[in-house]
Image: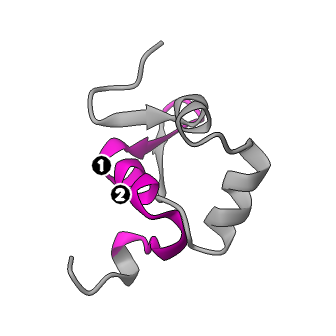
């Protein structure tokens, strides 16, 4: 089942980034990865735009709540 347009599933993000699930979870804990959005039932998705922003510069990535540029 494909996520709605503009959202990526955890598996899609893993494939795009080359990161394992545990690596993504560590980055979530450190608040250095696009935030997860809960999708029923018990699914996790991320905004595609945030994942693209992360891929542009993973080391400098800040989630929306920490950015000053909005």
Q: Is residue 20 left or right of residue 36?
A: right
- Up/down of 2 relative to 34, above or below: above
Magenta stretch: residue 62 in it? Answer: yes
Question: For residue 56, what is the image quadrant?
Answer: bottom left
- Give the quarter of the figure containing the C terminus: bottom left
Question: Which residue is the site of mark 2?
Answer: 53
Name the residue at the bottom extreme: 68
Residue 59 placement (x, y as % from top left)? 54, 71
Observer-nearest of 30 and 52:
52
Question: For residue 2, what is the image quadrant?
Answer: top left
Nearer the camera: disc 2 or disc 1: 2
| Disc 1 crowd, CA 10 A, few/some/many (<14, 14-19, 20+) | few
What is the image's colouring? one colour
Give the SS element for disc 2. Answer: helix
Q: Is residue 33 left or right of residue 8?
A: right
Residue range of the region highlighted in magenta in the rendering: 40-64
Q: What residue lies at 35% left-to-right and 57% top-to-bottom?
A: 53
- Up/down of 18 relative to 4, above or below: below
> What is the C-alpha distance between the residues marked 2 and 1?
6 Å
Residue 4 placement (x, y as % from top left)? 32, 26
| Disc 2 crowd, CA 10 A, few/some/many (<14, 14-19, 20+) | some
Question: Which residue is the site of mark 1?
Answer: 49
Give the SS element for disc 1. Answer: helix
Q: Are marks 2 and 1 in contact (CB under 8 Å)?
A: yes
Q: What residue lies at 73% left-to-right and 63% top-to-bottom?
A: 26
Q: What residue lies at 44% left-to-right and 58% top-to-bottom?
A: 54
């Amino acid at each position: 089942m494909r996520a709605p347009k503009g959202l990526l599933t955890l598996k899609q993000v893993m494939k795009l980034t080359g990161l394992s699930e545990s690596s993504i979870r560590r980055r979530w804990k450190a608040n250095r990865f696009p935030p997860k959005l809960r999708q029923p039932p018990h699914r996790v998705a991320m905004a595609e735009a945030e994942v693209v922003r992360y891929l542009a510069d993973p080391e400098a990535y800040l989630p929306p709540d920490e950015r000053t540029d909005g």
